Amino acid sequence: MVVCSGFEGPELPDSITDPRFDEGAHGHWLLRCHEGSFEFRAGAVQQLEEWPSLYEPLHRRFALSMGDRLAVRVLLGLLRLPGGSRLLRLWHSRRA
């Protein structure tokens, strides 16, 4: 994913293959790709690389156990009844 802050330039194609960005002077940039070359102005250009495996260990300790999932399913079903929201709040306060 590429983020261009303050983009000013021509309309870009829907998909860009093999992008390469070259920085010029005073916020001018040149995008070279298989679809052509595009010159534009931007405050900054950042290429973000997604790493889902980076967050997996962080989220693991917040994962619900099988018992918790069953309790949540039952409590969400009870929300339809009067007082169901109070039961959900009580369960959640005991869990923490």
Image (cartoon, helix red, strand yellow):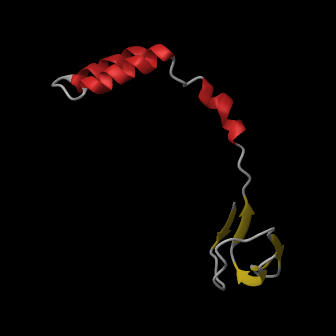
Q: Position of residue 76 (x, y in %)?
A: 31, 27
Q: Which of the 4 quarters of the picture holds residue 83?
A: top left
Q: Is residue 64 left or right of residue 51?
A: left
Q: Position of residue 13 (x, y in %)?
A: 67, 78
Residue with the most extreme left position? 82
Res. 96 visible in picture: no
Q: Which of the 4 quarters of the picture holds residue 39?
A: bottom right
The residue depicted at 69 percent of the width and 60 percent of the height is 1
Q: Is residue 24 above or below residue 45?
A: below
Query: 66 or 92, which lies in front?
Result: 66
Q: Is residue 23 above or below residue 79?
A: below
Q: Is residue 93 above or below residue 29?
A: above
Q: Position of residue 53 (x, y in %)?
A: 71, 37
The residue depicted at 67 percent of the width and 28 percent of the height is 57
Query: 95 or 24, which lies in front?
Result: 95
The residue depicted at 63 percent of the width and 83 percent of the height is 11
Which quadrant, please, contains the C terminus? Answer: top left
Q: Is residue 33 left or right of residue 10?
A: right
The residue depicted at 45 percent of the width and 13 percent of the height is 67
